[in-house]
Amino acid sequence: MHVVSVAESLPVLVGDQIEYFSKMGVNFFLACTPSDELVRFAAVRNATPIPVEIRRDITIFKDIKSVWQLVRAIKKYNIDFVIGHTPKGSFIAMLAANICGVRQRIYVRHGLLFETSKGWRYYLFKNIERLTGLLSKKIVCVSESVLTLSKKEKLGGKEKLVLLNNGTFNGVDAIKRFNRQHISLEAIDFIKQKYQIDHDEFIYGFIGRLVNDKGLNELVAAWKRILSFKIKVKLVIIGRIDFRDKPSPAVLDYLHSEPSIILIGHISTSINLYYTLIDVLVLPSHREGLPTVVLEASAMEIPVITTKATGCIDSIIDGVTGLFCKLKPEDIVDKMLFYFNDRSMANFHGKNGRHFVIERFSPTNIWDEFGKKILKINDSFY
């Protein structure tokens, strides 16, 4: 049983590994907040949907109800493995699994929320991490830097902490899905016409939740400086507002009103097509687990500008597949102008990025390691 907060994260967090392990006799159950997307995703992959409201914020009585619903489902279906994703979903999942006596309790640590929290929230989130780690049997860290920080902060015993291959939990399909060669020129022309992008315009892109933690404030400040150079550029922003950490009204107003910004919103399908709009991905994030959008962009031969924050530091090779920037608008501008002024280097870094993802983040390599290290599937299946 995989437990997540919302179904839209299932394709990234779980994805095609369901089909992969189903061939080995593993039955999958997907528990998350009820939605049409949950039903659709489960039906396509022949998994059993378990609708349980799992709120991202802390609501004690509703959280108790969520634990109880999971307990009932675990007992009903005789679940052997409970795998929790995201801090809130994992805490509820590990608690329910302990109540039911499930021995195989896996927490997938996709990032550490307390890193950018302050005051009482810092101590609350950090202690939730510790408690979730205590309740779990294994903690899968999605990147080397998350693993390192987990050890430093004592967020689980060393015998519990695991890194699968080079990181991520599900890998990135650079062969079939995130492959520019598999997208027709007609489709690329159509999407560019839809958003009125000229072929001679240089396009920067941001993909992710529209929150402060993703560096949106710094990106907006950098963009204002970029426009002062009077160059032919646009900024494509893909993602929805997360009200837990939403940017200021001034930043949101600017995103909606600035003509050079194309605000697309959340894309649930065909995100690979939207990557073809972008010449350079910019993710000045304050913290990550391992930013999937960076790996997807690299697979699509797009150079990346990101920070040395947790998770981000593992997602590129500086000066080879992208560039690290400081969390300062002026440094973000410098890196953005570097690629604008040197298109051949942008192309070179993009092609390097694709090789980087194929070599290090192949889904089957990660699934195989998960099957052997965690699920303990017999080697004869591989």
Image (spheres, grey):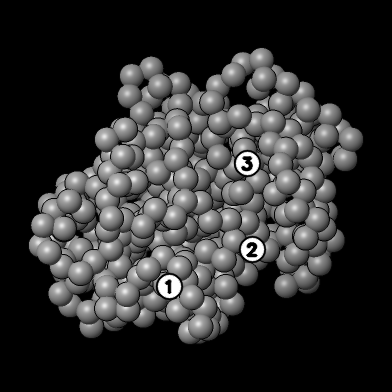
Q: Secondary structure at mark 2?
A: helix
Q: Are marks 1 and 2 in contact (CB under 8 Å)?
A: no
Q: Is residue 76 toward the left or the right of residue 99 in the image?
A: right
Residue drawn at (27%, 35%) of the image: 250
| Kind of residue at disc 1 | Gln
Front residue of 136 and 305: 305
How much space separates mark 3 and mark 2, taking CA atoms? 22 Å
Specify which label sits upstream in the sequence, 1 or 2: 1
Figure check: 151 above or below 24: above
Q: Secondary structure at mark 1?
A: helix
Q: Is residue 70 toward the left or the right of residue 338 in the image?
A: right
Give the residue number, with chain letter if any, for mark 3.
6
Q: Are marks 1 and 3 in contact (CB under 8 Å)?
A: no
Specify which label sits upstream in the sequence, 1 or 3: 3
Residue drawn at (78%, 60%) of the image: 44
Q: The C terminus lies in which quarter of the figure?
A: bottom right
Residue drawn at (48%, 84%) of the image: 185
| Kind of residue at disc 2 | Trp
Name the residue at the right extreme: 76
Query: What percent of the width, then of the height, locates residue 113?
Result: 43, 35
Q: Are marks 3 and 2 in contact (CB under 8 Å)?
A: no
Give the residue number, with chain letter if any, for mark 2.
367
Give the residue number, with chain letter if any, for mark 1.
193
